[in-house]
């Protein structure tokens, strides 16, 4: 029997390799550098652990996260494999001891944080023992195009040259875009690597995008229907993380939080509480999760749209690593676009890097707006093929979408924005449309506009929803300022001129039931349609649009 499968059965207790694992292990054992792209939960760790156990000498595993190292080393030790880690969490005397033992070649695997690579002690260690291989986990951290850039990853490149053995180099990541791939090969210094991308599909995950006005109510409802199950709620900012967490706690849920603003001690305590089931819900920024080894996470909800698909797929992919049905829900609102734009504007990149970030954000927005299969969209994004048109396990495949023509409503709104000079935010636009009697409206003379009060029968929420939709669909442009201002986009101008129709797509009902409790958010959408229907009856006569509008 093949040695690798023997180790798999004996130490891990699994019967078969998953897609790609045996191939990767074989190549490493034959001395070929490897670049593995495998989705989160695909089983990357085993691909370097098994060769490390088979080969002579010590394998160096470079890994970015302290908690991850500890988990993996604990697991290996429980299996009887001599393994250790060196990072900043160790006391000096302890790392001395590990260095001594490492120098005697006692470990099969030695995990190190990238920051350690250039220390004199470490260099000396590499020179003095036999190194079997160098494995780089979360290898996308070497790239600025990835989402977790860690400058110290750039130090890995020299590692191989320090050792006389010219050990084989194997890099692992879940991020598959071509820029990141090229960076990994270049910056880590893989030589003629065997590249493998394993299936990106995670069949047990149900993807869904939900446009919902009251995100918090949605979440409260969702978590109460999923009591006793572990879930993560990702928020874009610390402040939102704190808010959502305290609302959940106030409502009696067992929720904790995780973000960079908490001290180290509190962070690792909260992480452990979640890992060991003392807390059910983890509310976190994207600081939480890389390498988290919790298999039974039943849902990952994004309170905000993340900045790009790479980050989304990685975070959502933390659900259901045990292969059981799990849900990945993205709560989308146009406000998320404004927030992400703000973050990019105030971020560290500039020039072409920033342009690229905007492009990636646009792909993320398209994901939220598409009416096609979400799984297919994600898989195609990573340059992989998906051989079906419908997966039958995503919001868009399972829900029936009804379209309504809202061109007339859209024209009223656009013409109001136009008449207000494209200089005001949505609140004031809504007030003018509804004919509100505010001080500000009087002082700006907006009560004299012909669009003043043309939608007075509509509720604020209703108008907000339609405006949000028009923003998301690109008919209305939102400035990237502290006080975002609405103006008409080129597409919006086409609508005003009557040359383009606007239809709103809404989820009506589920084609078929997925799990017991997924049908939670259709009611709101139904209300919206009721309101539209009523509106249609009442407004036919009171249309006073600007003179240049040509009706078709
Ligand atoms: P990744 O690092 O790719 O996110 P991990 O290495 O943490 O994934 O593995 C995810 C889970 O899958 C782990 O619980 C692991 O034990 C399990 N796993 C890996 N390979 C196999 C296999 N061949 N058969 C069954 N389970 C596996
Ligand atoms: Mg991993
Ligand atoms: Zn689908």
Image (cartoon, rainbow, N blue to C red):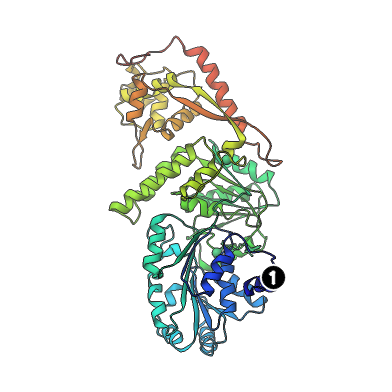
In terms of secondary structure, where does tag 1 sit?
helix
Instruction: Name the outermost residue toward the top.
Output: 541
Q: Quadrant of the N terminus?
A: bottom right
Instruction: Name the outermost residue toward the front.
Output: 1
Image-quadrant location for residue 525: top right
Image-quadrant location for residue 388: top right
491 or 10: nearer the viewer:
10
61 or 273: nearer the viewer:
61
Image-quadrant location for residue 291: bottom right
Query: Which residue has dot 1 on it?
Result: 9
Count of numbered circles on the image: 1
Q: Residue at x 51, y 51 (%)?
A: 313
- Image-based side of 452 in relation to 87, left or right: left
In the displayed structure, would residue 309 be above or below residue 503?
below
- Image-based side of 441 in relation to 517, left or right: left
525 or 77: nearer the viewer:
77
Q: Please provide percent x and percent y for residue 453.
A: 41, 18
Q: Quadrant of the C terminus?
A: top left
Quarter of the render that holds ligand 3: top right
108 or 510: nearer the viewer:
108
Q: Residue at x 54, y 29 (%)?
A: 506
């Amino acid at each position: 029997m093949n040695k690798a499968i023997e180790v798999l059965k004996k130490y891990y207790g699994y019967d078969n390799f998953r897609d790609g694992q045996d191939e990767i292990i074989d190549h490493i054992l034959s001395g070929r550098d490897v670049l593995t792209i495998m989705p989160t939960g695909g089983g990357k760790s085993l691909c370097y652990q098994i060769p490390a156990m088979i080969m002579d000498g010590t394998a160096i595993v470079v890994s970015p996260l302290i908690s991850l190292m500890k988990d993996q080393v604990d697991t290996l030790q429980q299996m009887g494999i001599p393994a250790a880690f060196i990072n900043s969490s160790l006391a000096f005397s302890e790392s001395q001891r590990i260095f001594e033992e490492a120098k005697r070649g006692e470990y099969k695997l030695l995990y190190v944080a990238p920051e350690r690579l250039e220390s004199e002690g470490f260099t000396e260690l590499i020179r003095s023992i036999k190194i079997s291989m160098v494995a780089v986990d979360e290898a996308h951290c070497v790239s600025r195009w990835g989402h977790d850039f860690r400058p110290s990853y750039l130090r890995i490149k020299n590692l191989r040259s320090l050792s006389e053995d010219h050990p084989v180099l194997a890099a692992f990541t879940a991020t598959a875009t071509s820029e990141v791939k090229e960076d990994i090969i270049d910056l880590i210094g893989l030589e003629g690597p065997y590249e493998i991308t394993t299936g990106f599909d995670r069949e047990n995950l149900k993807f869904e995008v939900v446009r919902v006005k009251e995100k918090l109510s949605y979440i409260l409802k969702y978590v109460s229907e999923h009591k006793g199950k572990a879930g993560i709620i990702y928020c874009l900012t610390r402040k939102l993380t704190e808010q959502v967490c305290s609302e959940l706690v106030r409502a009696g849920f067992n929720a904790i939080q995780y973000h960079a603003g908490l001290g180290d001690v509190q962070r690792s305590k909260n992480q452990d509480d979640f890992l060991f089931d003392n807390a059910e819900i983890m509310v976190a920024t994207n600081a939480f999760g890389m390498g988290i080894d919790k298999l039974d996470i039943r849902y990952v909800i994004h309170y905000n749209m993340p900045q790009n698909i790479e980050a989304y797929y990685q975070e959502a992919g933390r659900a259901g690593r045990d292969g059981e049905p799990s849900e990945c829900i993205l709560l989308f609102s146009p406000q998320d676009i404004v927030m992400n734009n703000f973050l990019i504007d105030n971020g560290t990149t500039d020039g072409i890097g920033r342009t690229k970030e905007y492009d990636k954000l646009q792909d993320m927005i398209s994901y939220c707006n598409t009416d096609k299969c979400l799984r297919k969209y994600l898989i195609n994004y990573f340059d992989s093929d998906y051989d079906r048109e419908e997966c039958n396990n995503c919001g868009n495949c399972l829900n029936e979408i009804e379209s309504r023509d809202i061109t007339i409503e859209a024209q009223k709104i656009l013409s109001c924005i136009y008449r207000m000079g494209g200089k005001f935010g949505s609140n004031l636009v809504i007030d003018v449309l509804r004919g509100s009697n505010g001080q500000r409206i009087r002082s700006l003379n907006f009560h004299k506009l012909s669009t003043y009060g043309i939608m007075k029968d509509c509720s604020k929420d209703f108008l907000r929803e339609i405006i949000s939709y028009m923003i998301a669909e690109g008919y209305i442009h939102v400035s990237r300022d502290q006080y975002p201002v609405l103006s008409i986009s080129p597409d919006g101008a086409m609508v005003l001129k009557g040359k383009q129709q606007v239809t709103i797509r809404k989820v009506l009902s589920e084609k078929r039931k997925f799990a017991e409790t997924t049908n939670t958010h259709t009611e709101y959408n139904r209300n919206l349609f009721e309101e539209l229907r009523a509106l249609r009856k009442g407004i036919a006569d009171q249309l006073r649009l600007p003179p240049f509008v040509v009706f078709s």
